[in-house]
């Protein structure tokens, strides 16, 4: 396994659509996913798409872990274990959107408020070729949509309605981010 170099905003590999993978079970795809996972963990990320590590393939991985909250009424669709998807696709299950703060390993040091669909369904192939199909809501839906955007050459600032809500992460933490979830 290896820690890969993460492309940063401005790198051409982040602005081009990724190409479909012919064989999700190919050894080079499995190696890529192992390296991506090691890279994501090393960078303290919650998701990573292949274009972020200079590979123009429709491959991503993410996790939406349970928080330390004692909430018992949290839907199962709000959480996901570490998930690797090859050639993913998705559809919205509701028109409802919410605004939430996002960061990105390819846009280091910045945080922005982005509107995303609240309830989606996605699918894609696992590294062993099995079709994974899930509903997602909350952070789970947000992180999937964020990583999927990378496959189409889109960074989260391009989704923002107002750049007034693009801030330096350390300043936002120092002054406290407002709760903009709607």
Image (cartoon, rainbow, N blue to C red):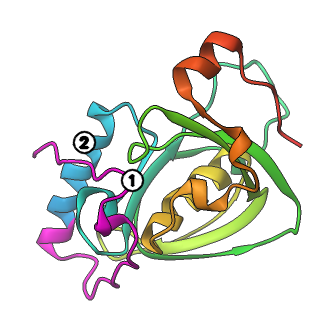
Do the residues bearing badges 2 and 1 touch, measured as CB atoms within 8 Å?
A: no
Q: Is residue 171 left or right of residue 177?
A: left
In this picture, is 86 found above or below 54? Answer: below
Under circle 2, the secondary element is: helix
Under circle 1, the secondary element is: loop
Q: Residues within 10 Å of mark 2 (few under 14, many from 20)?
A: many
Which label sits in the foreground, 2 or 1? 1
Front residue (pair 31, 131): 31
The x, y position of residue 12, in whole percent, is 30, 68
Whether 6 is among the magenta residues is yes
Which image quadrant for residue 21? bottom left
In this picture, is 173 found above or below 157? Answer: above
In this picture, is 107 found above or below 18? Answer: above
**Residue that appears at 20% across and 64% down:** 30
Which image quadrant for residue 123? bottom right
The x, y position of residue 151, in whole percent, is 43, 71
Q: Is residue 139 left or right of residue 107?
A: right
**Residue that appears at 10% across and 45% down:** 2
The residue indicated by pointer 2 is 39
What are the residue bounds of the magenta stretch? 1-29
The residue indicated by pointer 1 is 9
């Amino acid at each position: 396994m290896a820690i890969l170099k993460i492309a940063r905003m401005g790198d051409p590999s982040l602005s081009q659509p990724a190409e479909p993978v012919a064989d999700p079970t190919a050894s080079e795809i499995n190696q890529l996913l192992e390296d991506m996972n090691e890279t994501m963990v090393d960078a303290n990320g919650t998701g990573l798409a292949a274009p972020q590590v200079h590979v123009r393939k429709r491959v991503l991985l993410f996790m939406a872990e349970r928080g330390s909250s004692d909430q018992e009424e949290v839907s199962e669709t709000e959480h996901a274990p570490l998930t690797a998807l090859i050639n993913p696709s998705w559809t919205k299950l509701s028109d409802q959107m919410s605004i939430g703060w996002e960061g990105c390993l390819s846009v280091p040091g910045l945080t922005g408020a982005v509107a995303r669909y609240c309830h989606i369904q996605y699918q894609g192939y696992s590294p062993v070729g099995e079709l994974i199909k899930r509903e997602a809501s909350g952070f789970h839906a947000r992180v999937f949509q964020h990583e999927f955007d990378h496959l189409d050459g889109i960074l989260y600032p391009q989704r923002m309605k107002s750049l007034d809500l693009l801030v330096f992460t350390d300043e936002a933490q120092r002054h406290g981010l407002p709760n903009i979830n709607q």
